[in-house]
Image (cartoon, grey):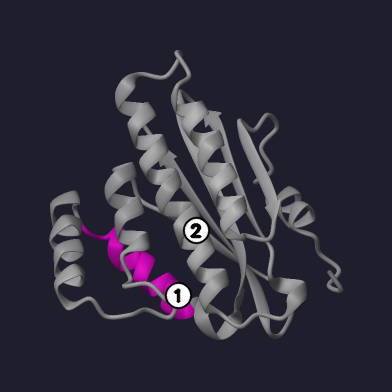
Amino acid sequence: MTTNHTISDILEQQGLFPESPLVFYQGGFELSTVDKLLAEIEVLSLNEKFVNRLKKKVFRVGVEVLQNLFHYFDNNELTEEYREGLFSVYEEDGAVTMISGNFIKNSQTRSVASRIDMINDLSLDKQKMLYRGVLDISSTSDGGGGGLGFIDIARKSENQLDYKFIKIDTAYSFFVLKIKING
């Protein structure tokens, strides 16, 4: 990267770099990378120390998060230096936490924040209704999908989505999405 910040530097500065990740990847998100990470999550979901409900949720949320990253990179014109992201899974306080991150144009941060805030303000039942409504409309979002990714992640994790935008320069920020998954 030609910027003064690597993803690892950004995470360390923000206190978001997990000490002992169960899964960690930093780089480009090609289809083969997503397939490899899904296989790692599948192996993780077989871990005996996790209850069955948590295993299923970890896998389902992981699929959604990785699809979100893949579709974002596939559908957005980013300069080469900003075409890498992050995916991490770790244990924290008896739960599993996933962190995803990607560079985002500063002009897109407000709409992403508004969408996540709106989803976080909804009950689980209202999120399900919104999900069905978006499916019925089947419009396309800025990320290239139907706008279902964040809704589905919140529904499947059954927790609010924690996010942060870290301004890198006048054109880009680094978007961090943190998802806590309880059993």
Q: What residue does disc 1 label? A: 143
Q: Quadrant of the C terminus?
A: top left
User: Which residue carries the number 2 mark?
Assistant: 163
Residue depicted at 36% across the width and 42% down the height:
60
- Residue 101 within the magenta-colored segment of the rendering: no
Specify whether residue 109 is in view: yes
Query: Outermost residue toward the top?
Result: 48
The quarter of the displayed image where residue 54 is located: top left
Location of residue 9 (image quadrant) = bottom right
Q: Nearer the viewer, mark 2 or mark 1?
A: 1
- Residue at disc 1, secondary structure: loop
Residue at the spot x=71%, y=85% of the render? 170
**Residue sitting nearer the eye, 124 or 65:** 65
- Magenta: main secondary structure equals helix
Q: Is residue 175 above or below residue 94?
A: below
What residue is rendered at 44% in x and 73% in y? 112
Q: Position of residue 62 (x, y in %)?
A: 45, 44
Identify the mark at residue 125; answer none if there is no mark: none
Mark 1: few/some/many CA within 10 Å (<14, 14-19, 20+): some
Q: Is residue 116 magenta?
A: yes
Count neighbours of disc 2 (C-alpha within 10 A) and say few if under 14, some if 14 to 19, many if 20 or more.
some
- Residue type at the position of mark 2: Tyr
Region rendered in magenta: 110-122
Res. 15 in view:
no
Q: Residue at x 45, y 14 (%)?
A: 49
Question: Is 35 left, or right, of 62 in this rendering?
Answer: right
Amino acid under disc 1: Gly
